[in-house]
Image (cartoon, rainbow, N blue to C red):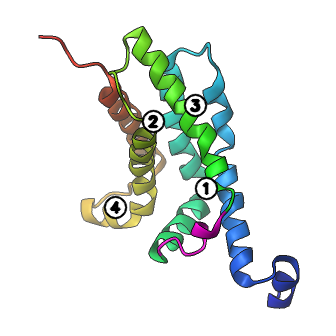
Amino acid sequence: VSKQILIHHFGSKANAHLAVLEAAYRASRQQDARLRAEAADPVEAMRAFVGQAFDHLRANRDFVALLGDENVNKGRHIRKSKVLGDIYAPLIAGLDAILRRGERAGVFRAGMDAQQLYISISALCYFTFSNAHTLSAVFGQDLAAPEALAARRAHVVDFVMSALAPPVQT
């Protein structure tokens, strides 16, 4: 695509880049509709969400690269988005609903913050893919191999679920 076509359709190269970012963010949130299943078991709903977050990044390495580039540039383009909040509000509300159902059922600790939880899940998943090459070099093994990713996925899900578990009464 030529620069002239981009400018014709988007007004500027920066606007085209923002449109790509917003489309990628929308695509990353498409699986979140399952969070709204009010009758879903909170443990299974959370395990599914964490697994889906990991799987989405595994299947969308270009999204990982886009996020990395945007962060290197201090969010220069995405800060101009007028839709990003609308994309993420249902996600945080859905996570909060799962957390509250889990609290009421006694399977999640009380008072967990959905936004903080989302950031933690994102960090655990994103780091796996953003740093796969350097970590593979450090540890002398291919951490992007299918079996390594399956083990990492299981660890991330278990790690999050352990963090959500109610404190053990002594």
Q: CA distance from mark 1 to mark 4?
A: 19 Å
Q: Nearer the viewer, mark 2 or mark 1?
A: 2
**Callouts 1 and 4 close, C-beta under 8 Å:** no
Q: Amino acid at mark 3?
A: Gly
Q: Which residue is mark 3?
A: 94
Residue at position x 40%, y 60% from top?
132
Queried whether the magenta region covers residue 150, the answer comes back as no
Q: Which residue is mark 1?
A: 60
Q: CA distance from mark 2 to mark 3?
A: 9 Å
Instruction: Identify the image quadrant of residue 78.
Output: bottom right
Query: In this rendering, is residue 147 above or below 38?
Result: below
Q: CA distance from mark 2 to mark 1?
A: 24 Å
Q: Amino acid at mark 2?
A: Ala
**Callout 3 crowding tier (Cα within 10 Å): few <14, some 14–19, many ≥20:** many
- What stretch of residues is rendered in magenta? 74-81
Residue at position x 48%, y 47% from top?
146
In-front residue for pair 74/51: 74
Q: Which residue is mark 2?
A: 114
Residue 1 appearing in the image: no
What secondary structure is found at the residue carrying circle 1?
loop
Mark 2 vs mark 4: which is more N-terminal? Answer: 2
Quarter of the image for the N terminus: give it: bottom right
Q: Position of residue 116 (x, y in %)?
A: 39, 42
Residue at position x 34%, y 61% from top?
136
Q: Nearer the viewer, mark 1 or mark 4?
A: 1
Majority secondary structure of magenta residues = loop
Q: Amino acid at mark 4?
A: Ser
> In the visual, does 114 lie left or right of 137?
right
